[in-house]
Each structure stands twice: as C-alpha cells, then as structure tokens.
C-alpha cells in the first residue's frame, strides 16, 4: 500500500469489526513482539532451510536455482524454506508457476452494486486456478495504470521503478519497465495491465541500476512480507509470496525479504523480468492444481481493490473480445485523463475501503 492513512472505514460494519482489530494486533506485533521474540524464534525455523547468500547486482553472476518439489500440472506450486540475513531469519517462499498458453491471466475487480468494492481471495471465482492481489493502492483505490479487457480504466502513475504487468492480445504476459508504458499504451495491443513498483528485474535478469544504487526512494533494508510476479525466458509466469517461518510467531507476521533480496530470489527462480506487488498485510494467494481439486489458500489480513486471476484456457475461452476505451460504468465520470501523472483511483467512492495501516516498500 502507498501513502499514510487515517482511520479506515470498511464497506460493511461487519468487515470493519473484523479487520481493524487484526490490523492493530499485527501493528503491535511488528513494533513490540517482533523485537522481543525474533532472536529466539530464529532457532525454531524449518529444518533444511537454505541461505541464498548475498545479493549481487551483477547480471552475469551465477544464481543457482533451488531444488524444489512441485505439485500440480497446469498450475504448479512449491515451497522453498530459506534463511535471510546475518541473523538467519526463517522465511518460507510459496512459489507458483504456469504457462500463459494454458492459463489466461486477467484482472479481477470486486463490485458492489456497480461500484468498486474490496477484494480478497474469498471472492475468487470458482474457476480460478490461481488468484492473488494485484498492484499497489492509495486511499482512493488502485494506484497507477489499469487496463481491463482492452479498456483503460486509469492512466499511468509516475516513478523510476513503477513498471507494469501486461497481458497482450496474444495472451502473453510481460513485465515492462516504466519507460515502455507509453509505447504499449498507444499500441492497442494490451488486454490487461496493472502498474506496480518497484521493478525488481529488467534487461534479462538484472537488478535495476536505481535499485542497486539506492537512488530509487525504496528502503533497501526494510523487511516485510512480500509478493512478486515475474516472467521466465520461456514466457512462463512465476509468482513468489513470502511467509514468516518461525514457530514462535504467526506466519503472517510482516517480516520477510528486503527488496533487493526479493529481486535476487526471483532471479534464482528463473525470472528475467519481475515486479513487486503489494505485500505486508495485503499479500494473499490461492491455488487450485486441478479444476475439481482442493484449494490451497494463503489469506491476507487486508482487502485490496484489484486482483489477478488465472483461468484455464478452454475452446470457449480461447478468444477474448477487445473492448474499446469508453467511460467506465464503475467510475464517477470518465477514466482518468491521459494528462494525469498521479495515477488517481478509478473511483473516489472506494476511499478508505481497503483496511488499515501503512507499508514501506
């Protein structure tokens, strides 16, 4: 999440009563209990956890992939226990990978009587094989560029490392840098797009220079629960979400990789291009390895405005019509004008509808 927030109002009183205490509880944990318990909990992490080693900004540096045991076929998932930093902080990465030729990735937007509503994996469609929260957000809703079914809902935001995930008209998934958004925006070849930051990998698996220099405005030492998405050389999508893996504290405790560490982990998982999505209390993931199989869920503690959902491609779903840009029925007027540089929300009615707290990226 971006920006500071005042007291939040959720869409329903029931939701407000459930989420606000959780946010306050975890805020206390991160400021008090973490410092008191972390040293003792490090020793109770999962046996056999690997230490990935120091982060390298050298694009040609050897980055051996982890040995993982995969489950599933169309959608494959695995877990990678690791220890991070000098203190060996125990973290577990949940990793998902799939071929966009077999699974179509689209944005999913929760609606309540025609207006934007908070989304969580509990609202994932029944045919979703994978679902996760998308992008970043502000007090007003989604931040930055949003395209859904060929229609631009919101103009791009600005930022050196504010890249975007796009699905083009061929169904291919791409992670593009901020500098390429303008050309893709005018190409007419974008079906789905969501802007996020920071870009973790670009130019064939290289950490961006601004990230390596610390000149990007990103806190390079802050640890948090992370969620990132990338694309491998073969075009397959790779998703990684971190969970705290010590036994003395909850796994949703917002402690995990630093931003450079997350970039390096995505590179070790084979991604050539990658971008961070909202982590912390927002990070959530759902996987169904079979259409009629059991569901694996890693819930978050905060609802979000947007999601990414992957559905298995069938004959009836092979062609998706491109919707020409028109004013969105879910906005208060037309989509944000192309002159905007702030990436304001789809609708101001969504203000304060997505939980509480702040996140430092």
Image (cartoon, grey):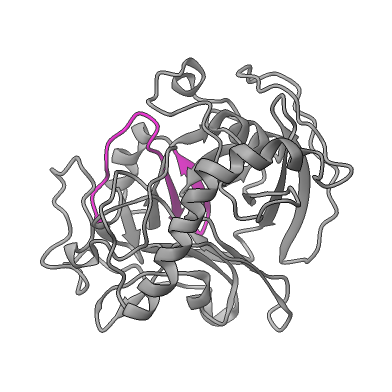
Q: From what the image shows, is residue 316 above or below residue 110?
A: below
Classify residue 183 by image quadrant.
Answer: top left
Where is residue 261 drawn, in percent x and y? 62, 31
Q: Residue at 13% of width from left, 68% of height from top?
A: 332
Of the 4 image quadrants, the one containing the C terminus is top left
Tell whether position 326 is magenta: no
Q: From what the image shows, is residue 205 above or below residue 196?
A: above
Can residue 208 be seen here? The reply is yes
Q: From what the image shows, is residue 228 above or below residue 178?
A: below
The total of numbered circles placed on residues is 0
Q: Nearer the viewer, residue 121 or 150?
A: 121
Where is residue 94 drawn, in percent x and y? 69, 53
Magenta residues span: 154-176
Classify residue 91 by image quadrant.
Answer: top right
Outermost residue, right side: 48
Can residue 303 be seen here? The reply is no
Where is residue 168 drawn, in percent x and y? 44, 54
Left or right placement of residue 102 versus residue 13 in this view: right
Q: Residue at 80% of width from left, 30% of height from top?
A: 64
Left or right placement of residue 338 versus residue 34 in this view: left
Q: Residue at 59% of width from left, 51% of height from top?
A: 253
Tell whether position 162 is magenta: yes
Where is residue 167 drawn, in percent x and y? 46, 55
Q: Residue at 24% of width from left, 80% of height from top?
A: 114
Q: Nearer the viewer, residue 18 or 81?
A: 18
Left or right placement of residue 346 versus residue 206 in this view: left
């Amino acid at each position: 999440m971006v920006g500071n927030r005042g007291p939040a109002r959720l869409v329903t009183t029931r939701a407000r009563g459930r989420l606000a205490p959780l946010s306050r509880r975890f805020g206390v944990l991160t400021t008090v209990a973490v410092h008191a318990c972390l040293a003792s909990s490090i020793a109770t992490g999962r046996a056999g956890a690997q230490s990935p080693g120091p982060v390298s900004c050298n694009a040609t540096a050897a980055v051996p992939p982890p040995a993982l045991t995969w489950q599933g076929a169309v959608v494959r998932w695995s877990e990678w226990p690791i220890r991070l930093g000098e203190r060996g902080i125990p973290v577990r990465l949940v990793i998902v990978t799939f071929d966009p030729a077999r699974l179509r990735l689209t944005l999913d937007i929760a609606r309540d009587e025609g207006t934007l509503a908070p989304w969580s994996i509990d609202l994932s469609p029944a045919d979703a094989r994978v679902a996760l929260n998308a992008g970043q957000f502000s007090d007003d809703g989604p931040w930055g560029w949003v395209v859904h079914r060929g229609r631009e809902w919101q103009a791009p935001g600005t930022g050196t490392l504010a890249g975007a995930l796009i699905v083009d008209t061929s169904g291919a998934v791409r992670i593009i840098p901020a500098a390429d958004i303008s050309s893709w925006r005018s190409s007419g070849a974008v079906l789905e797009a969501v802007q996020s930051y920071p870009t973790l990998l670009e130019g064939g698996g290289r950490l961006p220079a601004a990230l390596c220099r610390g000149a990007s405005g990103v806190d390079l030492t802050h640890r948090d629960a992370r969620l990132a998405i990338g694309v491998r050389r073969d075009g397959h999508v790779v998703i990684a979400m971190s969970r705290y893996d010590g036994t003395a504290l909850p796994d949703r405790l917002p402690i995990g990789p630093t931003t450079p560490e997350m970039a390096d982990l995505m590179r070790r998982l084979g991604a050539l291009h990658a971008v961070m999505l909202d982590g912390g209390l927002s990070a959530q993931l759902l996987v169904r390895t079979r259409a009629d199989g059991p569901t694996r869920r890693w819930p978050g503690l905060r609802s979000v405005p947007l999601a990414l959902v992957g559905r298995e491609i069938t004959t009836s779903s092979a062609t998706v019509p491109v919707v020409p840009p028109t004013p969105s029925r879910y906005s208060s007027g037309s989509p944000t004008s192309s002159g905007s540089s702030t990436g304001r929300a789809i609708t101001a009615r969504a203000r304060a509808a997505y939980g509480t707290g702040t996140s430092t990226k």
